[in-house]
């Protein structure tokens, strides 16, 4: 036995003896006595050397391969227990969910069933944690909080924070390792209404579980590498979230002139900080503050803020993807590696029932259906006296149709064989995928008129899922390659993004002019 193990056993023994003596003298409460016993037991197990050479990740990997089809149960239980039983503090769930994707990539289990299972189990874990916090969390903190410096005032601050930013905390916290196991519990403890918790938990668990499952499925031959990358990415994301939160907190504090003066007095009273404050921090603030304020205005609502920036970003990314694939296909019209992967995936999962379902979904991306939606939306906007949004919708849809037809005529790319529905024209880009972005455009317009953030987010999510389903149905029916679908999405989003930018500028100018005071009569 090593010296380290001996020391750990000695510490465990001392803790146990001290706890028994204090308990005998009635100087140790029952709760603290239990905590000391647990700590002593953990130290004793570690010091005994029983866990020497034990690797939890290797054990889970070996167990998953041994379970075969029962891997569903292993991944589902751990996805639930990460938040539902707070296991995430000692065993982050990324590893197990990625492992499930790897097992699916090897052909042992089905990836679609795995994604559904992880999504449901992770959401149920969040819900259980939320109601545990609702039932026990606040009561426990009110009773024992002062021992941990959690006063009644601080608890009220946490409650106010969750009522303002609870949804974003649940969504972002799902991707932050040390926040994920605790966020639902705190949300319940802070009396956040479950109806506000629900949509963000559903969205967060769905994005988190789907992303990790797909990563494991695609890169199943490089399991150790992808888990390492995912772990580093989570750590970096957590650090960025922490830095952003710290910057926001400091900026709010410094808006108060009294707190700014207090900071300056503190800096002047410390000889070490004084030169750094006068020669580095304050000059840098004077140079960078205007640029930071400019960027902040671009990222916040109002004027030409976050809406314009987001529309421009969507347009640039969409047109970049469309152009990138256009150039690649022009030089080589054959399928790309991603095209072959998704084509093989569709062939391996194709059944008669799913083909019929894909045909139904595909109809919703056809020109007659999407064109009818555009006309209906334009009429509704005209009735509500929103001419700017109406013109943006009509001009965007018409430009997309022209772009699809012109590109198909110029790029004579053959379609995959054999096709499961009758089609005409060349493959690139997918007209159905391009036209399906109409759903997203209508949802974005609805964002400006619908009440409630949860309702707006739900509408956007549903519209995006419809567009994705339509595009994937074209691959499943073997009438388009993956690159055709991505090119169609890129063209549609790029054009609608540009239309939105123009509409926002026009709307801003109209409001600015209407706000100008009328000239006084001479």
Image (cartoon, grey):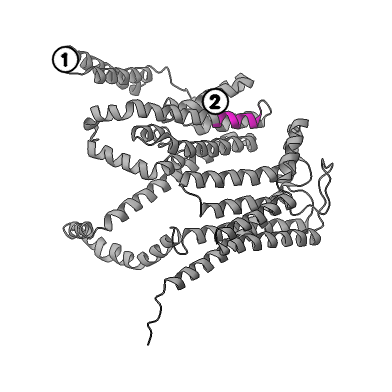
Q: Position of residue 200 (x, y in %)?
A: 47, 39
Residue 111 is covered by the magenta coloring:
yes
Q: Nearer the viewer, residue 67 or 226?
A: 67
Residue 98: percent from the left, percent from the top? 57, 33
Above/below status of 401 relative to 219:
below
The circle on residue 76 is 2
Q: Residue at x 69, y 61 (%)?
A: 398
Would you name the residue on which mark 1 appears? 26
User: Is residue 435 shown left or right of residue 303?
Assistant: right
* Mark 1 or mark 2, earlier in chain: 1
- What is the spatial separation of the Cα atoms under label 1 and label 2, in whole angstroms? 44 Å
| Residue 506 makes an appearance in the image | yes
Secondary structure beneath disc 2? helix
The answer to whether one can see residue 91 in this image is: no
Point out the stretch of residues depicted in magenta. Answer: 110-119
Residue 398 has which mark?
A: none
Where's the C terminus, which quadrant? bottom left
Element type at marker 1? loop
Q: Is residue 96 left or right of residue 187?
A: right
Which residue is drawn at the image coordinates 64% and 38% (left, top)?
A: 218
């Amino acid at each position: 036995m090593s010296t380290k193990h001996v020391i750990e056993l000695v510490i465990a023994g001392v803790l146990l003896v001290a706890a028994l003596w204090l308990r005998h003298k009635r100087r140790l409460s029952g709760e603290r006595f239990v905590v000391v016993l647990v700590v002593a037991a953990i130290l004793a197990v570690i010091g005994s050397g029983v866990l020497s050479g034990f690797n939890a990740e290797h054990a889970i990997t070996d167990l998953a391969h041994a379970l075969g089809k029962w891997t569903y149960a292993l991944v589902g239980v751990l996805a639930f227990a990460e938040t539902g039983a707070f296991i995430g503090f000692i065993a982050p769930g990324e590893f197990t969910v990625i492992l499930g994707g790897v097992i699916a990539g090897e052909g042992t289990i089905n990836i679609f069933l795995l994604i559904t299972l992880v999504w449901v189990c992770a959401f149920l874990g969040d819900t259980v944690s939320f109601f545990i916090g609702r039932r026990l969390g606040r009561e426990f903190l009110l009773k024992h909080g002062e021992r941990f410096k959690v006063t009644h005032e601080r608890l009220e601050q946490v409650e106010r924070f969750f009522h303002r930013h609870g949804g974003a905390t649940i969504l972002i916290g799902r991707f932050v390792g040390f926040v994920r196991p605790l966020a639902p519990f705190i949300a319940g403890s802070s009396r956040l209404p479950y109806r506000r918790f629900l949509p963000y938990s559903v969205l967060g668990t769905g994005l988190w579980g789907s992303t990790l499952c797909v990563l494991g499925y695609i890169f199943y031959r490089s399991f150790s590498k992808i888990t390492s990358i995912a772990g580093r990415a989570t750590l970096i994301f957590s650090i960025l979230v922490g830095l952003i939160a710290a910057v926001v907190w400091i900026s709010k504090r410094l808006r108060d002139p009294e707190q700014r003066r207090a900071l300056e007095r503190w800096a002047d009273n410390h000889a070490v900080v004084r030169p750094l404050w006068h020669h580095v921090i304050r000059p840098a603030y004077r140079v960078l503050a205007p640029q930071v304020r400019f960027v902040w205005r671009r990222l916040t609502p109002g004027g030409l803020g976050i809406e314009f920036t987001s529309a421009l970003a969507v347009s640039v990314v969409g047109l970049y993807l469309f152009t990138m694939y256009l150039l690649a296909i022009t030089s080589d019209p054959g399928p790309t590696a991603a095209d072959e992967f998704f084509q093989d995936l569709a062939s391996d999962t194709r059944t008669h029932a799913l083909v019929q379902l894909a045909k139904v979904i595909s109809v919703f991306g056809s020109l007659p259906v999407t064109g009818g939606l555009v006309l209906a939306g334009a009429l509704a906007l005209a009735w509500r006296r929103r001419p700017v949004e109406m013109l943006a919708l009509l001009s965007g849809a018409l430009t997309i149709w022209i772009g699809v037809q012109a590109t198909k005529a110029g790029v004579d790319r053959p379609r995959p064989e054999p096709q499961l529905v009758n089609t005409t024209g060349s493959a690139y880009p997918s007209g159905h995928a391009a036209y399906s972005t109409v759903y997203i455009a209508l949802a974005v317009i609805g964002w400006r008129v619908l009440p409630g953030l949860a309702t707006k987010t739900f509408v956007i999510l549903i519209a995006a899922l419809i567009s994705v389903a339509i595009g994937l149905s074209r691959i499943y029916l073997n009438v388009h390659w993956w690159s055709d679908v991505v090119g169609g999405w890129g063209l549609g989003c790029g054009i609608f993004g540009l239309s939105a930018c123009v509409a926002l500028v026009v709307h801003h100018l109209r409001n600015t002019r209407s706000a100008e005071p009328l000239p006084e009569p001479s």
